Image (cartoon, grey):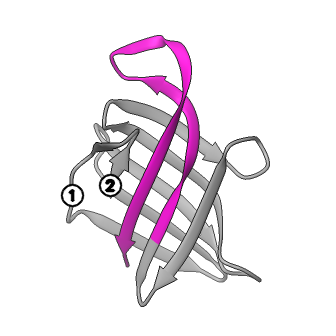
Amino acid sequence: MTVNGRDAGTTQSVQCNTIGPLTMISTGDQASGLTAMVSNREDLVVRNLGINDLGGFTGSYNQGLGGEANVSMTGRTYDINGTAEGFDTDNPSFRTTGTFQVKIAC
């Protein structure tokens, strides 16, 4: 994972749950991690993504509410990248846009 160009580390703590065309993905724990919902109803699309204190950033992307997120899949690995609205963990008083790139194997 990278957030704002900073290496946010690697985790082996990954959960993927698929219900119909939706896959819910979570990594990390309550202190630091990521959640995402990806749909494959027609095309592969990121519905939402939340970042919690990764690479010094906390924020979210929600389809249709600004920002962008792209997803592709190779085998069982999702490659998700884009922008999220949020704040720097060290300076939570000011909103900022963060960039992210994540590879998650389910």
Residue drawn 38% across the image and 43% down it: 3
Residue 19 vs residue 104, the one in the foreground: 104
Image side of residue 41 versus residue 74, left or right:
right
Query: Where does residue 68 sit, x and y in percent of width and height?
Result: 66, 50
Image side of residue 24 versus residue 4, left or right:
right
**Label 2 neighbourhood size at 10 Å, few (<14), some (14-19), many (20+)?**
many
- Which mark, residue 1? 2
**Label 1 neighbourhood size at 10 Å, few (<14), some (14-19), many (20+)?**
few
- Which mark, residue 29? none
Callout 1, which amino acid? Thr
Residue projecting furthest to the front = 5
Q: CA distance from mark 2 to mark 1?
A: 7 Å
Query: Where does residue 106 sit, x and y in percent of width and height?
Result: 38, 79
Let me know if residue 89 is in the magenta part: yes
Residue drawn 49% across the image and 43% down it: 99
Residue 49 vs residue 72, the one in the foreground: 72
Query: Where does residue 42 sit, x and y in percent of width and height?
Result: 77, 83
Residue 81 vs residue 30, the one in the foreground: 81
Image side of residue 6 versus residue 3, left or right:
left
Q: Quadrant of residue 75?
A: bottom left
Q: Quadrant of residue 56?
A: top left
Q: In what quadrant of the picture does the N terminus appear?
A: bottom left
Residue drawn 36% across the image and 22% down it: 89
Callout 2, which amino acid? Met
According to the picture, the residue beneath numbered tag 1 turns out to be 10
